[in-house]
Image: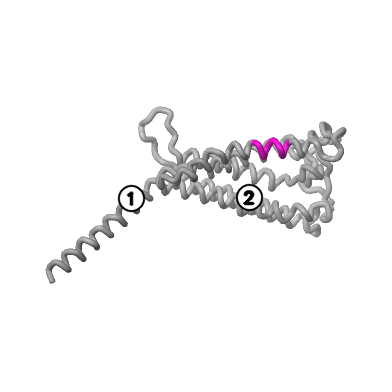
Amino acid sequence: MSLEWRARPRSLAWSNPLAWWWGLLTLVSGANIAVWFLLYRRLQEPPTGSLGGASSTELMLLLCAAYVFGCAFRSCLPRADVQRICLFDTWLSSVVVGRSVATVAEICFAAQWAIILHQLGTMTGADTTLNAAWVIVPLILIAECFSWYGVLTTNYLGNAIENSIWAVVTHDLAEWKDEIAWMSLYFSAAVWASLALCVCCSLKDHLPHYRTEATVASSSSNALAVVSKSTR
């Protein structure tokens, strides 16, 4: 089986709806990467002088980068693991490579949620939220193990090793129609959620300040009301 890269095969001409779908995925991925770089420049905190200490916002940006770039990779080289099909004839489209990238990206995305839930639970003193933050990543790890098991033990287990190294190239819309919907949403809306989590994390230091201001304002209003009543 040839390992030669075919950037634009004849069978993936622009008359094929798959070509337009792939082009849209690639465009959205490029925009997502641009937004990540913008957030990185805007949200990255200056060094505080502490040795080896990365802020939670910087950690969130790194986790987000793994997810954004991982989804961009999967968008540019779409593949369906169980069906053993891919859009481009390259070793990068192998199930092993693609599933490995997906595993790292999804664990990083789960870690983002865990960090946000831990921050919210700490701020509000909600034990349920804190417990949820601690179990998210282990649950995702278990899910990833099942995912790998499902990929490797599909109906043709005897060919699992060979098929895990390579995928069958197809540009037939009928083969991809069940994958288009979830891939389109996953590589767009889910990535936007990852970017949004970085913004939420960057606001963590402002939330107590806003809450304090609201408390002070409420106390001032109550005090003024008491004074007003006492002077009547």
Q: Mark 2 falls on what kind of element? A: helix
Q: Mark 1 falls on what kind of element? A: helix
- Three-letter code for the amino acid on which mark 2 is drawn: Ser
Q: Work out whether 209 lies above or below 115.
A: below
Extreme-top residue of the structure? 51
Q: Please give the residue where the numbered disc 2 appears in the rendered image.
A: 29
Judge whether residue 62 is colored magenta.
no
- Three-letter code for the amino acid on which mark 1 is drawn: His
Dominant SS of magenta comes to helix
Q: Work out whether 140 lies above or below 222.
A: above
Task: Residue at 52% x, 51% y: name it.
Answer: 196
Q: Please give the residue where the numbered disc 1 appears in the rendered image.
A: 209
Task: Residue at 68% x, 54% y: name it.
Answer: 184
The quadrant in which residue 158 appears is top right
All told, the count of numbered labels is 2
Task: Residue at 53% x, 38% y: name it.
Answer: 134
Q: Which residues are magenta?
A: 142-148
User: In which quadrant of the rendered image does the N terminus lie?
Assistant: top right
Q: Work out whether 124 lies above or below 134.
A: below
Q: Position of residue 34 (x, y in %)?
A: 56, 49
User: In which quadrant of the rendered image does the C terminus lie?
Assistant: bottom left
